Amino acid sequence: MSKKKTEKQKWLGKVRWVFNRYIRLRDAVRGLEGLCGKCISCGATWLLMSPDDWKKYQAGHYWREDKYESVRFDERNVNGQCSKCNVYMSGNLAEYAEGLKKKIGARAFNALNIKRNKVHSHTVVELERAYRIYKKLLENKEAELGL
Ligand SMILES: [Zn+2]
């Protein structure tokens, strides 16, 4: 394994962590009793109280991140999702598509579908930049939600 690859993998992991957490908080909704997770596919909402509630709340990709790197960190492609849909139903993609079209509109949905076919390999410089951006967005979101 070359040094460069190791460096890239390190940054991929760092971006992935802040990006996924930011997405989950972006999509969380305020309920009467507190912050709730919301699933883009089945529409389920549930209170985020215990670590288990949080574990059930994931950042689900519409186009798989391991196959479509061009949209791996595209905010349109990643949305709050319950673990049942994300893991046990492999994304529950038919319902995901419906939920996503409703959320971002048909035009953005089509643009995302075109972008996924672009061959793109993130450079370390791009990943470092993405990390700074999403770390900041995450901090702002956490402050806004009082976390
Ligand atoms: Zn779901």
Image (spheres, rainbow, N blue to C red):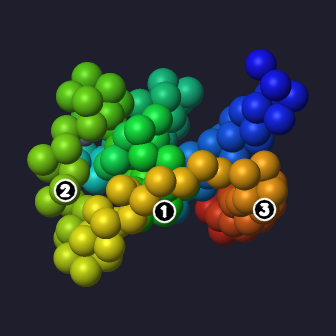
Q: Which mark is residue 129?
A: 3
Callout 1 secondary element: loop
Q: Which mark is residue 86?
A: none
**Identity, as a three-letter code, of the amino acid under mark 2:** Ala
* Horizontal side, residue 10 vs residue 81: left or right: right
Callout 2 secondary element: helix
**Residue ID for mark 1:** 75
Give the residue displayed 27% in from the left and 37% down from the top. Answer: 91
Tell me, yes or no, whether the two marked residues, 1 and 3, touch with CB atoms within 8 Å.
no
**Identity, as a three-letter code, of the amino acid under mark 1:** Glu
Reading the chain from its start, which is encountered first: label 2 or label 3?
2
Q: How far apart are the alpha carbons under marks 2 and 3?
A: 29 Å
For the residue carrying disc 3, how many other residues have a C-alpha within 10 Å: few (<14), some (14-19), or many (20+)? Answer: few
Give the residue displayed 29% in from the left and 62% down from the top. Answer: 113
Q: Quadrant of residue 108?
A: bottom left
Reading the chain from its start, which is encountered first: label 2 or label 1?
1
Q: Quadrant of residue 73?
A: bottom right
Q: Quadrant of residue 25?
A: bottom right
Q: Quadrant of ligand 1?
A: top left
Query: Closer to the camera, 96 or 127?
Result: 127
Can the viewer see residue 70? yes
**Residue ID for mark 2:** 97
Give the residue displayed 15% in from the left and 60% down from the top. Answer: 98
- From what the image shows, is residue 44 above or below residue 71? above
Q: Position of residue 145 (x, y in %)?
A: 62, 62
Quarter of the image containing the N terminus?
top right
Tell me, yes or no, whether the two marked residues, 2 and 1, touch with CB atoms within 8 Å.
no
**Residue at disc 2, CB closer than 8 Å to ligand 1:** no
Callout 3 secondary element: helix
Reading the chain from its start, which is encountered first: label 1 or label 3?
1
